[in-house]
């Protein structure tokens, strides 16, 4: 089937919830993707932060093939070894005590919200809890996750959502403090906002929020679906802030391609859940947790974090240089392999131009290019990206002038 036929047929049967690019991707190798026409693309999106180990990692693939031949699914009515090994690896790495595996980051956020509310209910005997979330945040598109997503345009068509949510300004500690009431059960935020424009929390802000939570017996929920699992140079971004959440949310690179997420908590908080309070049919099955266990193993064996620290700094230098050379760049933000370039105009046409030149980029809001490469990206490929991007910006700027 040629790419045109594939696209046309897909448009007839898939719901129109995505503005897809006219490319049919077929296979991947390392940090490159190939379409059905054989064209090669340098990937700086990693499936929106998912493919940390790159494409066609032999050890990862072999682990999944081996599990397929053993057992895919049993339900959570029984134990299985891959889930045990994955849970031990996750809790050891995160500093949490107990973990619940889900099918996605959105589901993990849903679970975190439920756990926070159940914890409040057990302590106060009332179902009137409130949650503070951040403006410009993104936590998912299901009803609960959408309720704490700080973008009104995402929420308004689906209201009424769950109640008791107050929004505060990100990186504004006094505004967060002003939103706290005696009913506040939890504060939820991304350690680094992704969809909102790639904004890292300041150390003063995050440590201040953590202190407020401790002082007022409020749970701190950190959503590290995108910024966790090594993307900022430490396994979890909060490690760089000297704080520990009460509830942690993870997904994306946790499984490096299989649909898996997780929320984890300290023992005291996790104990609020009792049998029947939460559940999932597919979550934590042997197949996806075999992937999770292998991801943790390969992160250590292949020194993935070391690569992010070294080459994330190199990416920062290259983008900083590009920002200085391009008058249209308003700001450069980010850390590790999670960075953004904000422009004075929408970046959609730059992304399209990049795609036509064999470079895959994504946005974070209308004016910001977001860089989420596989965590195995090397300097020579960062150089390749920088040259392609400069060419695309130049071509776009000239086209704008010609108009």
Image (spheres, rainbow, N blue to C red):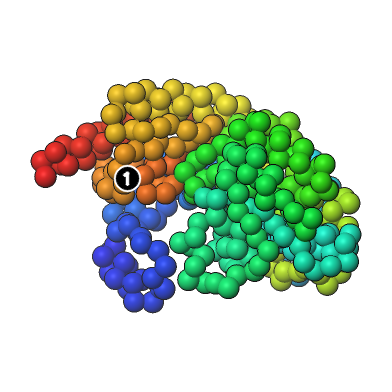
Q: Nearer the viewer, residue 150 or 46?
A: 150
In which quadrant of the rendered view does residue 117 lie? bottom right
Residue with the mark numbered 1: 347
In the rendered view, tell whether residue 230 sits above or below residue 261. Answer: above
Residue at 52 percent across and 45 percent down: it is 194
- Return the residue found at the far left: 402
Please state the total of marks drawn on the protein image: 1
Q: Residue at the location (81% across, 42% down)?
A: 214
Give the x, y percent position of residue 278.
77, 68
Q: Image check: 70 left or right of 7?
A: right
**Residue at the spot 51% in from the left edge and 28% down from the top edge:** 312
Q: Is residue 96 left or right of residue 164?
A: right
Q: Secondary structure at mark 1?
A: loop
Q: Give whichever of 28, 190 is nearer the camera.
A: 190
At a point 40% along the width and 32% down the height, the residue shown is 331
Q: Is residue 74 left or right of residue 273?
A: left
């Amino acid at each position: 089937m040629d790419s045109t036929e594939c696209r046309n047929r897909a448009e007839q049967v898939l719901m129109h919830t995505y503005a897809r690019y006219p490319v049919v991707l077929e296979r991947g190798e390392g940090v490159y993707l190939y379409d059905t026409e054989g064209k090669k693309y340098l990937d700086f999106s990693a499936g929106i932060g998912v493919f940390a180990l790159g494409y066609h990692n032999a050890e990862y693939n072999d682990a999944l093939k081996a599990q397929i031949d053993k057992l895919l699914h049993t339900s959570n009515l029984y134990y299985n070894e891959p889930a045990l090994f994955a849970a031990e690896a996750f809790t050891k790495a995160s500093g949490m005590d107990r973990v619940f595996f889900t099918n996605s980051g959105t589901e993990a956020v849903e679970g975190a919200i439920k756990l926070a509310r159940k914890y409040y209910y057990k302590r106060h005997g009332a179902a009137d809890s409130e949650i503070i979330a951040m403006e410009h945040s993104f936590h998912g598109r299901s009803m609960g996750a959408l309720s704490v997503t700080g973008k009104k345009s995402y929420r308004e068509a689906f209201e009424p959502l769950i109640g008791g949510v107050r929004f505060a300004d990100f990186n504004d500690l006094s505004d967060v403090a002003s939103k706290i009431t005696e009913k506040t059960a939890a504060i939820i935020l991304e350690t680094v906002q992704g969809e909102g424009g790639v904004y890292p929390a300041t150390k003063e802000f995050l440590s201040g929020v953590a202190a407020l939570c401790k002082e007022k017996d409020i749970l701190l929920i950190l959503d590290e679906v995108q910024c966790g699992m090594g993307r900022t140079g430490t396994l979890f971004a909060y490690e760089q802030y000297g704080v520990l959440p009460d509830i942690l949310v993870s997904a994306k690179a946790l499984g490096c391609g299989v649909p898996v997420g997780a929320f984890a908590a300290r023992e005291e908080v996790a104990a609020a859940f009792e049998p029947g309070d939460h559940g999932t049919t597919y979550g934590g099955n042997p197949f996806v947790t075999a992937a999770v266990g292998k991801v943790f193993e390969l992160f250590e064996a292949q020194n993935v974090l070391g690569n992010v620290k070294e080459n994330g700094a190199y990416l920062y230098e290259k983008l900083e240089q590009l920002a200085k050379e391009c008058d249209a760049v308003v700001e450069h933000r980010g850390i590790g392999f999670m960075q953004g370039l904000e422009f004075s105009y929408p970046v959609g046409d730059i992304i399209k131009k990049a795609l036509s030149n064999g470079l895959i980029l994504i946005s974070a809001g209308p004016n910001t290019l977001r860089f989420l490469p596989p965590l195995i990206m090397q300097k020579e490929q960062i150089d390749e990206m920088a040259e392609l991007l400069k060419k695309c910006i130049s071509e776009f700027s000239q086209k704008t002038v010609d108009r």
